[in-house]
Amino acid sequence: MNPPAGPKKLLDWVDEVAALTRPDTVQWCDGTTEEYDRLMQLMVDDGIAIRLNGKKRPNSFLFRSSPSDVARVEKRTYIASRTKEAAGPTNNWIDPDQLKETMKGLYDGCMRGRTMYVIPFSMGPVGSNIAKIGIEITDSPYVVVNMHIMTRVGQKVLDVLARDEEFIPTLHSVGKPLAEGEADNGQWPCAPIEEKYISHFPEERMIWSYGSGYGGNALLGKKCLALRIASVAARDEGWLAEHMLILGITNPEGVKKYVAAAFPSACGKTNLAMLVPTVPGWKVETVGDDIAWMKFGQDGRLYAINPEAGFFGVAPGTSMDSNPNAMKSVERDSIFTNVALTDDGDIWWEEIGYDAPGKLIDWHGNEWDAATADKPAAHPNARFTAPAASCPAMAPEWEDPAGVPISAILFGGRRPGTIPLVHQARNWNHGVFMGSIVGSEITSAALDLKAGTIRRDPFAMLPFCGYNMGEYFQHWIKLGQKADQSKLPEIFFVNWFRKTADGKWLWPGYGENSRVLKWVFERCIGEGEATDSPIGWMPAQGAIGRPEGVSEQDMAELLAVDREGWLREIKSVREEHYPKFGDKLPAELSAELNTLEQRLNQS
Ligand code: GTP
Ligand code: SPV
Ligand code: MN
């Protein structure tokens, strides 16, 4: 694609970046299949990509990242607002001028020997008034092909820009300039950890990323734009940018409702969004699996769109049993990163549903034999990138620029104890309280955190809120106050991850979660039997059907109020969680905490 005629602001910025980073050439991306194919071939020729067996996995490719570049890096992620207070207690902050100084030093000449790609992309349907336009400059062709799938790329975006010059500039480099005659030689390029920066300048609505080529660090439309920067815009403009899946659920009578759900990373959003119900006659359809932008409509209801166009999903654990719709989404036209390779040119990962067929090449590129291996063949945070349109469960309306009206919001996380399978908030503020105390058990997987501990992850937004989390709580409270109370979504707290004393799952999860969704649906239309409890509304006995293999005793445990556990929870929120927010903590939330304690003590 030739450089466009304008807007000038964009052309100037591209020139300025090229002068600083000094690439060999500059290429404007047009989002076409031809461009995708050409870049894939280039990466295959460079030994960075492996073309999978076209008979098994048509038009699909495998990439292996550097072992030092396998996930988001929270400790290198910065919210560089003017003041530290604006970033708040939960974000890493550096003074923006100082950070720019450091990063300009790193960017200086960083694209030497490489091509600089300019990607015009839209988060949300192109031209929709809820959509936002970004430009990503990157020296990674891997980023370009992933952005093709995850966002809407190309000329039509520039056409919109020609009418309205507003765009979010995002700059990315893998941070590995090439000397004269040097090549990557099949090695995934990235910079050492202490040179990685995933930086956000919220007041300027600008993103600078350096040193990592992986996922949310590098595909800047996703976490950086659609959550960290969008959350700031949402606060200023009165809407919500959330780490939530969106699904449609239809009952046997054909009535359809929409549910949004916030669970921390690797806690089941993609799986719930694509769920195949075990309850006969019910249907679930996918609108989005990771991010929701929600605005109140003229009719006073909250409408959600999925700003993305694809899935960047966790591969291990995905099987025809656990998530058949994801498996069908990756049958073709997909990118796989850090999974294992079979000797017939297909992919494999742990718990894919069948044994590794003989010897594999693991995600490091080494031979791997199931009989002798002591490490997994796929990295626990190995991912697939697949077009949303490939998913058989997509709701026909998933790209509707008007969005879908949300009837229920769920919060959840991995909690082996205390939090029951489901309970419902008494009102909006109680629901905001539930969101504010979300926590999750750290599994060994993706992030560089201590396994086995519970980390508070309010609204599943801890790594993704672009401003002070205390103000974010206030924003949620305020939106509820301004809204028509009768039209606000009902709020629920769910937990698929209860364990027995010996560490087994109490609840089978996956498709069986439809039993909980059914109760949620029924509660939204004033049916669904519930009993009042100290922690909120709970399903009446028998209101949630018991899956095969779950004993009556287990069911009772899943739906009990664990008084001692909740009193410990209150103590931890009061002493370790809420104090972080100081005077930014809304009084409404402390009041909810006190009410909960009183109700438990009276019970
Ligand atoms: P991100 O893409 O990181 O935001 O993750 P996510 O929230 O979309 O999580 P995903 O659906 O990919 O699931 C993460 C892991 O949790 C996978 O290993 C799943 O197999 C597992 N999982 C998902 N749903 C359930 C469930 O209902 N029960 C149990 N036990 N595990 C689940
Ligand atoms: C998450 O960590 O929540 C993800 C993966 O969805 S990434 O896009 O890498 O952030
Ligand atoms: Mn996510």
Image (cartoon, rainbow, N blue to C red):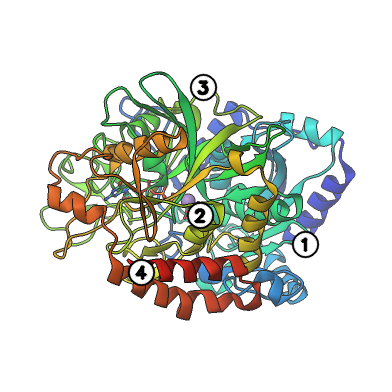
The amino acid on which the numbered mark 2 sits, given as a three-letter code, is Gly
Closer to viewer: mark 3 or mark 4: 4
Q: Residues within 10 Å of mark 2 (few under 14, many from 20)?
A: many
257 or 341, nearer to the observer: 257
The amino acid on which the numbered mark 4 sits, given as a three-letter code, is Gln
The amino acid on which the numbered mark 1 sits, given as a three-letter code, is Glu
Please give the residue where the numbered disc 1 appears in the rendered image. 203
Q: Quadrant of the C terminus?
A: bottom left
Which circle's residue, 4 or 1, is located before the other in the chain? 1
Which circle's residue, 1 or 3, is located before the other in the chain? 1
Please give the residue where the numbered disc 2 appears in the rendered image. 431
Q: Is residue 327 left or right of residue 94?
A: left
Q: Are marks 2 and 4 in contact (CB under 8 Å)?
A: no
Q: Is residue 296 left or right of residue 352?
A: right
Which circle's residue, 2 or 1, is located before the other in the chain? 1
Please give the residue where the numbered disc 4 appears in the rendered image. 602
Q: Is residue 324 left or right of residue 456?
A: left
Residue 5 visible in the picture: yes
Which circle's residue, 2 or 4, is located before the other in the chain? 2
Q: Quadrant of residue 501?
A: bottom left
Q: Residues within 10 Å of mark 4 (few under 14, many from 20)?
A: few
17 or 155, nearer to the observer: 155
Closer to viewer: mark 2 or mark 4: 4
Specify the label residue 396 is tagged with.
3
CA–CA distance between discs 4 and 1? 47 Å
- The secondary element bearing badge 3 is classed as loop
Q: Are marks 1 and 3 in contact (CB under 8 Å)?
A: no
